[in-house]
Image (cartoon, rainbow, N blue to C red):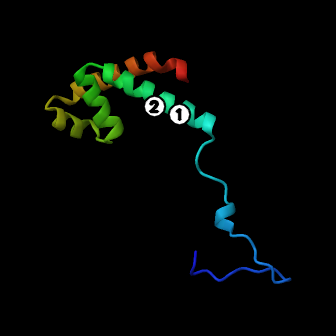
Amino acid sequence: MAWLPFRRNDEGDELPDPVSQAPSALPEPGRRLEIDEAMQALDRAVDALPARQRQAFMLRSLEGLDVEQTAIAMKCSQGSVKTHYFRALHALRAQLEHLI
């Protein structure tokens, strides 16, 4: 922030840096722990999926591919992508429903 002029009040006292006083965007430690545990549970649940379901889930959800692009990447039909993706979501919801 060196390029900003020093801020002073009417008495000439230096005002605190507003950036340093801004609230942190990071979650509180307890919430951060919950998020970390949920992510670890999701990782384990995704790893437990059958390979084709895992592949469809990763390509659709994480890579953001549409059904057609996923079918090309998986070298299968769009119907197969839809089936694998649906089954993956169903399995993940069943395994992770306790986190919701």
Q: Amino acid at mark 1?
A: Ile
Label 1, on which residue? 35
**In the figure, 32 relative to 24: above or below?**
above
Residue for point 62% across, 52% down: 24
Mark 1 in CB contact with mark 2 (< 8 angstroms): yes
Label 2, on which residue? 39
**In the figure, 26 relative to 20: above or below?**
above
**In the figure, 25 relative to 72: above or below?**
below
Q: Secondary structure at mark 2?
A: helix
Residue for point 50% across, 28% down: 37
Residue extending farthest to the left is 75
- Residue 68 lies, in percent from the top left, at 22, 38
Asked which quadrant contains residue 5, the reply is bottom right
Residues packed near mark 1 inside 10 Å, few (<14), some (14 to 19) or many (20 plus): few
Asked which quadrant contains residue 51, the reply is top left
Residue for point 59% across, 51% down: 25
Residue for point 26% across, 19% down: 50
Between 86 and 79, which is closer to the camera in this rendering? 86
- Residue 80 lies, in percent from the top left, at 22, 24
Between 28 and 94, which is closer to the camera in this rendering? 28
Residue extending farthest to the front is 13
- Residue 70 lies, in percent from the top left, at 23, 36
Q: CA–CA distance between discs 1 and 2?
A: 6 Å
Q: Amino acid at mark 2?
A: Met
Residues packed near mark 2 inside 10 Å, few (<14), some (14 to 19) or many (20 plus): few
Q: Is residue 19 left or right of residue 75?
A: right
Q: How many marks?
A: 2
Which quadrant would the C terminus be assigned to in this image?
top right
Asked which quadrant contains residue 31, the reply is top right
Residue extending farthest to the right is 11
Q: Secondary structure at mark 1?
A: helix
